[in-house]
Every structure is written in structure tokens, then in C-alpha cells.
Image (cartoon, helix red, strand yellow):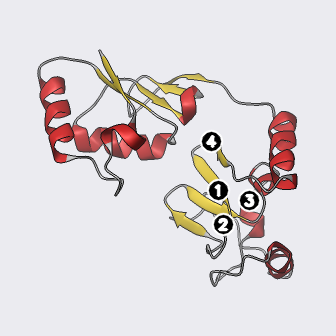
Amino acid sequence: MVAIDLDGTLLTSEKLVAPEGARLIKQAVQSGIHVVLATTRNPHTVQSFCRLLGISTLMICTNGAQVWGSPAGPVWAHHFLPPEIALAIAQLADRHDWELSITVGSMTYWRQRPGQALWPIGPNRLVVVRNADAVTGDVVRILAPNPKPLTAYDRSANRDSLANASPRPSTGPIAQ
């Protein structure tokens, strides 16, 4: 078995799989070696890399909080923080102006950076005003029906804009 990290190991600085690395991984898989991706990334992203590389074995995601038997499942283990502890950590980070990457289910949330738009930034990824927004209820409630990206970094201005927005109709997961 070979376990490989993604960021800083398999991926280039452009976040792409290096051609030589892809070739070697595919060769290993074809020769019967179990290749495992072990990463901080969420399952949705890891599944994409597994498809690209022909990996059909175990996946270790979100810093080990989720272990999948294969990219298609089942989930073998999941180790999540109780909501009250997750909220306490997020609130502490907000008080100190720290950025967190928070995964809830298959969705990963990032606290807004200076100049960064506030809305979905890709499949299963969303930027929120505060870290605590990622762990307090249904994040869909903070999105406007036809959002225009907010790029101002003034957190209170963003919070006021969102507070006055009408809620987005709930249609299940956030559109990708």
C-alpha cells in the first residue's frame, strides 16, 4: 500500500496533478498496489482525484475525520466534533481573526479573506463571513436569492447586507 497526500506532495503549485506523478500512480494501481489518498481535503474533491488517477481503494479525507472504503463509499469511519465544541472553536477563531477551513458533511466553509467574494466558490465550497456561520444551523439562510458577490472586507457591512437579504428558497444542497 502507498498513502499519498495531495497538497504539497502530489499536486503542483497550480493545484494540478504532476504528469509524472499521475503516470506513476496509474502504473502502481494497474500493477495491483493499493494507492490511498490521505488529505485534509473533503470527500467530494478527493473523489475527483481518485477518478482522475484510477484509484478505487480507501480514501482518508478531512485530516482523517472521514475514512471511506472506496471513492463510491461506504464511509468506514467518521469522527466529528460535537456541535457545541465546533461552535466554541469557531467563535474563538472569530475573536482572534483566525481563518478556519470547516467541513460539515460534504460541504467545506472558509472564512472570508480581504477582497474575497462571499458566496459559493465551487462544488461543495462556500465562503462565509464568520467561522461560526459554518457551524450554526443551515448556512443556506445567509444567501440572497440572486447574490451579487460581496468583495468588501468590512465584516459588519457584509453582515448587514446579508441580514437584509430575503432568504433563498430551500431546494436542498447549495447549487454548484
Name the side, left or right, on which 91 lies relative to 148.
Answer: right
Residue ID for mark 3: 139
Q: Disc 2 vs disc 1: Cβ atoms closer than 8 Å?
A: yes
Dot 4 crowding, Cα within 10 Å, few <14, some 14–19, many 20+: few
Q: Disc 4 vs disc 2: Cβ atoms closer than 8 Å?
A: no
C-alpha distance separating marks 1 and 3? 12 Å
Q: Secondary structure at mark 3?
A: helix
Q: Earlier in the sequence, mark 4 or mark 1?
A: 4
4 vs 1, front mark:
1
Q: Earlier in the sequence, mark 3 or mark 4?
A: 4
Q: Secondary structure at mark 2?
A: loop
Residue ID for mark 1: 110
Disc sitting over residue 105 in the figure: 4
* Type of the residue with mark 2: Arg
* Type of the residue with mark 4: Gly
2 vs 3, front mark:
2
Residue ID for mark 2: 113
Q: Secondary structure at mark 1?
A: strand
